[in-house]
Amino acid sequence: MRPSTYLTYHGYIENHIKPQLGKIPLNDLTTLHLQQFYKKLLAEGRVERIEAQKQPKGLSVKTVRNIHQIISSALKLAVEQRLIAHNPADGCALPKAERKEMQTLPVEQLTSFLREAKDSGVFALYYIDLTTGLRRGELLGLKWSDIDLEKGDLRVQRQIGRINSKIIEMPLKTKNAYRTLPLSADAIDVLMQQRRKTGNSEWVFPSPTGGPMSPDSVLHMLHRVLKRAGLPKVRFHDLRHTFATLALQNGVDVKTVSGMLGHFSAGFTLDTYAHVTTSAKREAAKTMGNILSGAV
């Protein structure tokens, strides 16, 4: 198991499973207990903390299904070791995972968004994300030692996450996520200005106390900037989608975009952004038709 996966599972166990199910004897645990537990997680499972006060109280379907997987695996082992006769997790009806619709910021909205981000003092954070397509944790995990302003590149080496209400450094989830990205001239200028602002902090985007920023706080800032700019609310991950969509629409090949995003394969990227590539193929067909129309 990868270290980051272990830490995530550990957080699920400490924050959710142990507090709710830890006092029930193993032989007394039933499918009904688990169903009630999952229902409660969906309704009010979010760990209480300051950054989460205005967020929905329930956990996502994906998180609940991940928690079920942990419980089911543990109970399967208990059956194999003859500690219990059967696995109560086998009879659970799980909530269906819903694929969230991808949203992007159209080009005509980016100017308003970045103008408001600059007025709010968070321009560098969102500009760099839009020019690199970094995941939120990867962006917050950047240290100045990862940036070579002379060569113009950025190395993705770690991510920032939260375990047991603590903000910590974590390894990246896959080997493909460890990557080096080129920086445009404008991005280098933005980072130079950011370097002067951060003083002695090792983090490119530090919190007010000098440590890494909370993943929740940058999401709240994003929503504030969008609201002030009069733009619809999007997820932080949609900034990554915006980067990928604009790159593909402007002729960057799928393999290059896949590498920049840190995807495990170009096929996954192609599947994720099929709507973009399909549109591009139609435009290519139309262009070729116009070029060859005189020969028909």
Image: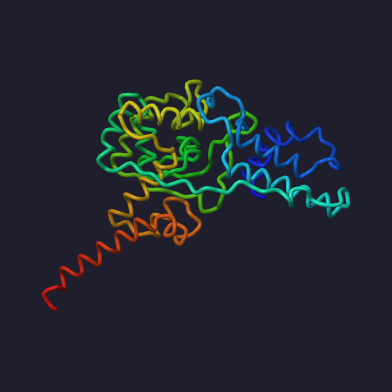
Answer above or below: position of 43 versus 245: above
The spot of residue 215 in percent (x, y) is 51, 32
Total residue callouts: 0
Q: Looking at the image, can residue 151 be seen?
A: no
In the rendered structure, the answer to whether residue 22 lies left or right of residue 171 reads: right
Q: Which residue is situated farthest in the left direction here?
A: 294
Q: Position of residue 22 (x, y in %)?
A: 78, 34
Residue in front for this viewpoint, 254 or 109 = 109
**Residue reaching furthest bottom?**
296
Q: Position of residue 174 (x, y in %)?
A: 56, 51
Which residue does the image show at 65% across and 38% down from the upper left?
39
| Picture layout, residue 7 above or below residue 279 | above
Image vertical order of residue 272 relative to residue 71, above or below = below
Q: Quadrant of residue 109?
A: top left
Name the image colouring: rainbow
Q: Residue furthest right?
A: 82
Q: Quadrant of residue 224?
A: top left
152 or 242: nearer the eye? 242
Q: Quadrant of the C terminus?
A: bottom left
Left or right? Give the position of 210 relative to 238: right
Residue at image position (42%, 59%) is 270
Residue at point 38%, 57% (across, down): 256
- Note whether 17 is above or below 102 in the view shown: above
The percent coordinates of residue 177 (x first, y second) are: 51, 50
Q: What residue is at 64 percent from the left and 45 percent from the top?
A: 66
- On the question of residue 23 being in view, the answer is yes
235 displayed left or right of 91: left
